[in-house]
Image: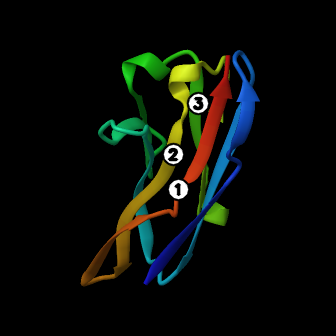
Amino acid sequence: QVQLVESGGGLVQAGGSLRLSCAASGSIGSINAMGWYRQAPGKQRELVATVTSGGNTNYAGSMKGRFTISRDNAKNTVYLQMNSLKPEDTAVYYCNMRGWSNPINAFDAWGQGTLVTVSS
């Protein structure tokens, strides 16, 4: 069983910055991909950014130039640096990791969510 614990959410003014962290623990053999998603009230969950085990990154169009995803393989941790925040970035942010617990069992784990509120 793999568990993800998120931190770093909070209240920030428009134009400010926040750094989210997500650390994995448990039965981890390998992590193939890490990502961040977000969900605002009344809206569908959307992809924010992903990073593969090889370091390849992908961002949603509205995040490019403002958000940066990074990972620390030794700590099984993924980060999301958010700059130039806008009120429309207000949402619950979720961490996701996919990989293998052992040679026969894959995992797809989600964090508990951390609330980011951007005031105008």
Residue 92 in picture, x, y percent from top left: 51, 45
Q: Which residue is mark 2?
A: 92
Q: Which residue is mark 3?
A: 68
Q: Residue furthest left?
A: 104
Direction from residue 91 to residue 16 in the image, left or right: right
Q: Quadrant of the C terminus?
A: top right
Q: Residues within 10 Å of mark 2 (few under 14, many from 20)?
A: some
Q: Which residue is mark 1?
A: 113
Q: Select label 3 or label 2 by which is in front.
A: 2
The CA span between labels 2 and 1 is 6 Å
At 38% from the left edge and 18% from the top edge, which residue is drawn?
Answer: 61
Give amino acid for label 1.
Gly
Give amino acid for label 2.
Val
* Scheme of image coloration: rainbow
The CA span between labels 3 and 2 is 17 Å
Report whether residue 53 is seen: yes
Numbered tag placed on residue 10 in the rendering: none
Residue 10 in picture, x, y percent from top left: 71, 43
Residue 2 in picture, x, y percent from top left: 46, 77
Residue 85 in picture, x, y percent from top left: 64, 21
From what the image shows, is residue 117 above or below residue 15?
A: below
At 71% from the left edge and 15% from the top edge, which residue is drawn?
Answer: 15
Please state which of residues 99 and 9 is positioned toward the viewer in this rendering. 9
Q: Secondary structure at mark 2?
A: strand
Q: Are marks 2 and 1 in contact (CB under 8 Å)?
A: yes
Direction from residue 3 to residue 97 in the image, left or right: left
